Image (cartoon, helix red, strand yellow):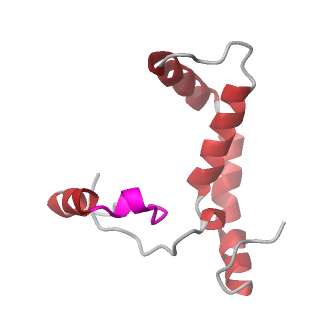
Amino acid sequence: MGLQFLFMDDNAPCHRTVAAEQLLESEDIERMDWPARSPDRNPIEHVWDFLGRRLAARTLPPVTIWELRLALQDEWVAMPQQFIDTLILSMGRRWETCLAVRGDHIPY
């Protein structure tokens, strides 16, 4: 991944297992400090929501794991670049708002 790579996760218990810690350490991957339960700060949560909505809107939803995999790949490729750009550009504002509410969830 290169020397400038920094791993970000959301502190979910599955990301903090001994096995996960050992893997990151064995690959010499540095983990970003990240507050627990902070979906407002994590753009991937919005991507998962987007993909979930797109899958739910399909006239024929995937039934098998293989169909789900193919459908997710199709929706990932079809994700508008503008959506991704908007998420990236919103990060500064999201962090400022989270800091203003002392790290709590952003009020909607």
Q: Quadrant of residue 17?
A: bottom left
> Residue at (71%, 42%) from the top-left corner?
82
Residue occupying the point 50% across, 19% down: 70
Q: Residue 7: x, y in percent? A: 38, 61
Indicate left or right for 8 with 74 as reference.
left
Image position of 56 with respect to 34: above or below? above
Q: In the figure, 75 relative to 4: above or below?
A: above
Q: Which residues are magenta?
A: 9-17
Q: Position of residue 16 (x, y in %)?
A: 35, 64
Vertical arrangement, residue 82 with respect to residue 38, above or below? above
Residue 7 visible, this orientation: no
Tell me the quadrant of the picture where the C terminus can be found: bottom right
Q: Nearer the viewer, residue 23 or 14?
A: 14
Q: Residue drawn 71% across and 34% down?
A: 53
Farthest left residue in view: 26
The answer to if 94 sits in the magenta stretch is no
Q: Position of residue 60 (x, y in %)?
A: 68, 12
